[in-house]
Image (cartoon, coloured by chain):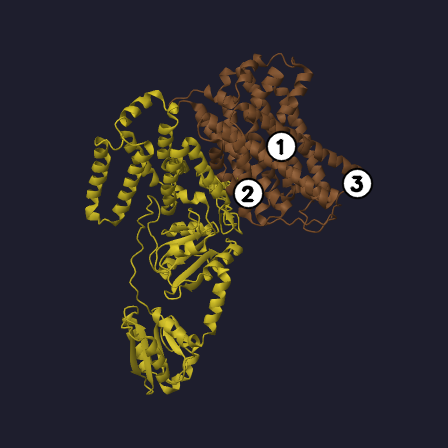
Chain colours: A yellow, B brown
Amino acid sequence: MMITRNRYRRAENEKNPENNIEISHSLKDNLTILQEQFKDCADVVMRSLKTAGGRSACMIYVNGLIDNNLVQRDVIPTLLSLKESQLSELKDTDIFPTIQYSKVFILETAVDYVLKASTVILINGINYALCFNLQDIETRAFDEPEVERIIKGPHDGFVESVAKNLSLIRRKVASSKLKVKMMTLGKRSKSDIAILYMEDIANPEIVRKVEERIKNIEIDNINGAGYIDQLTSDSPFSLFPQFQGTERADKAVANLMEGRIVILVGNTPVALIVPVDFFQFFQTPDDYNINYFFGSFLRLLRFTGSAIAILLPALYIALLTFHYQAVPLNLLVPLAESRSKIPFSPIVEAMIMEIAFELLREASIRLPTSLGPTIGIVGGLVIGQTAVQAGIVSNVMVVIVGITAIATFVVPQYDMGLVFRIGRFITMISAAIFGAVGIMVVILFAIAHLVTLESYGQPYFQPVAPFKLKDMKDIFFRLPLFMYSSRPDVALPNDKTRGRGNSKRR
Amino acid sequence: MWHCPMTKPEGGVTVKEDNVNLITSKQAVVFIMVTQNGVGILYLPSDMAGHAGHDGWIPVIISGVLSLMVSLAIIALCRRFEGQSILDINRIIFGKFISYILNTIFIIYLFLAAISNLGVLASSIGVWFFRSTPLWVLALYIMLPSVYLASKGLKGVCRFNFLIVITIPVLLSSIALNIHNLRLTNLLPVGVHGIDEIAEALPHTLFAYMGFEALLFLFPFIKDKQRIVKHVMIGSITVTLIFTGFVAASIAVFGEDLLAKRIVALVGLARMIEVPVFERVDLYYFAIWIAAMLLAVNAYLFLTFNTVKKVFKIKSKIILLAGIAFIVLVFTSKLSEDADTIFQINHYSGDALFLLGVLYPILLLIITLITGKGVKKT
């Protein structure tokens, strides 16, 4: 329904005559329209020049986006020395000594070029515009992403420019099979989008699907990768992330090699990866760079951490409210002692502490680093120790909140971590009403949702359900690398084998 | 090779299955296994001990072999009709009007099965955890995942069944961790209860084996029909072995007299397990077993949903699901928590299974073999 509406709108736009005005031979006419368009745009500069042949010309650019030095060195002198005889050649030959150079016949397109940091030149008597892409946009260096730090492995991460990010990936994949499809998205923001895939590995059907879904987005501004994620996912109401966002180039490349598709979005360092499966969110590039045994240990640690994050407070509530028979006697006595002065039921006690912790966590993101120690004192002393002394919460509860808090940070992906944060509250409430049964029902419901969820038509919970033994090598355990001769099935790769692995085995 | 018929066979029935319902034969067999493995097994050992004493495992193994035979008969029947479901076969053989009545009877059976499974699940939770919570509240809460899954189609239900990798080890571990309590002399002398008692106990095993008749409804959805026989055999033999082993182990641990009084053998076995740190292991066992029982509820709820949708041609998924859930809930809430009522409803469904899942397909198969009715291979 939405797609057809979008198509209709797009067709209407194409029919709209205002967007299709051709550049006329008269510079004056062109400039009148452009001046009207760029009215009150103080950053757009229109500089009048005269060629050697005596024709008037106009150079249009956005101040601060173009490389002044290059334009001054290569474009302006050539333009000024342009003779009448050269004008006829202009259409077929490149007399300007620049790399990126194009001719545009539609005025609206020329406007787009100006806004996308090109230097556009209009010459009287010529019905096209010359566009030079000599931009100089400030970008930062390829730093290590703050939220995805690793110990062993490359430390370069994406930046805010699609072109630079592309170069970073191309540096790591020197193959002509790495294909890049560029498009712009956002009616007003005109953000660059690049869809990357390995031609001989990725499934063309999924590539086509990704392209189509992104093309069908009708929005005026793409502010970050999350917009694309939410506008194209299979089940937009699901809590679970259906795209993997990463700032790591090595992770993007590893996923390309598994036949997945990487989407780079302009003005954000986050690249999106599709299709995804649930277990991918528990993997980090570090797992593969270290010994398989430690890799497996870390993997198991993460799954255990996630289970603790979602279950521990709920188990506490269920055990203390309904199933105190299941608590060992040696533990029950100190537990009862510590709870004897607490005026609240376990669920209220747990809610107070969990919400306090969530507040602390959210506040610490906003606080300037210089105030970091303050949060430490408030969090550690006031909320922890003093709350116990004041008799608001029990000692055991503080321990549980502490362990749970640490456990939520073990999940390497922020989006998946959020699911566990929210899931914790759902299990807690359910446990307060139905005890262990409540916890079971929430888990079963979550699994029911996970097994029916799909990412670009691929089962989200594979290789567990549907079960694929071959792909289990990289789920709960990270088996030795020489066993990785086949690619995982998630992206339905065309080329299923990676190579023979360990050279000793040949 | 057998294909899912997309053409129009004799009876004027078109089977056109959409993608969300197509499954592999392995998934179909796991579907049957989880249906059998969930609810019936809880009460099977004590029921058997009551009827056949320490020879209780003999009717279980006989029943397992018979259920395999019936499954094969069902496959043969469905294959004669190009792999259509019992609903379409009824229509082809008996015409529109009579088949409508027959299919309605099947729907009533599926409702009964869903209600008895959910009833056992909810009432066991009531007995074990929440004595004063009304049954319908527990049943409503516990069936939420099932209703959600039923709305997502057979594929989702079958993927959910991967939980079998948790439930079967749980069952087996209850025996393995009690290995020092096994007194094999409790099983001896073999056969002392005689053929009469064993034959008498046979019908009581039916409720535990309930689930193989799902093939009657699932057959059209299976993609690789040529491999179903192999997988059904593997699945059926596995379930029979597990059931026989579990009943025999329960008898060996408790002895026939004590076991007849212990209504839920699994919990009894779990209670005898002692591990450090955790106390009352039976509670954990039972909590995990909720998942196993839910799988059976899932299966019947989906079958009911799909069958009603097909027979009465109801388009609105929400109304249909809500209606089915409501009916199941109302009848479940009428059950009481004591074991007698539950045994009663289990035996009713066991009898209904005998009529509709065993006698009827075999009869139909014999009739079609004699009259030569059926859809020819294409």
**Mark number for residue B372?**
3
Q: What element carries label 2?
A: helix
Q: Residue A440 in the image: state x and y as whole percent.
A: 44, 34
What amino acid does circle 2 point to?
A: Gly
Foreground of the two, A232 or A80:
A232
- Residue with the mark numbered 1: B234
User: Do residues under tags 1 and 3 come within 8 Å of each other at their CB atoms?
Assistant: no
Residue depicted at 60% across the width and 29% down the height: B238
The vertical placement of A278 against A317, above or below, is below
Seen at 64% across and 50% down, the residue is B16
Q: Identify which amino acid the numbered label 3 is placed on.
A: Gly
Is the same chain shared between marks 3 and 2? yes
Position in image of residue A247 (x %, y %): 36, 52
| Residue A163 in which image quadrant | bottom left
The answer to whether residue A488 is visible is yes
Crowding at dot 1, Cα within 10 Å, few <14 / some 14-19 / many 20+, comes out as some
Badge 1 or badge 2: first in the primary sequence: 1
Where residue B270 appears, x then y in whole percent?
A: 47, 22
Q: Residue B323 carries which label?
A: 2
Q: Where residue B62 appears, x then y in whole percent?
A: 66, 24
Q: Is residue B80 left or right of residue A401?
A: right
Whole-number angstrom distance, CA of label 3 to CA of label 2: 40 Å
Task: Say whether marks 1 and 2 touch (CB < 8 Å).
Answer: no
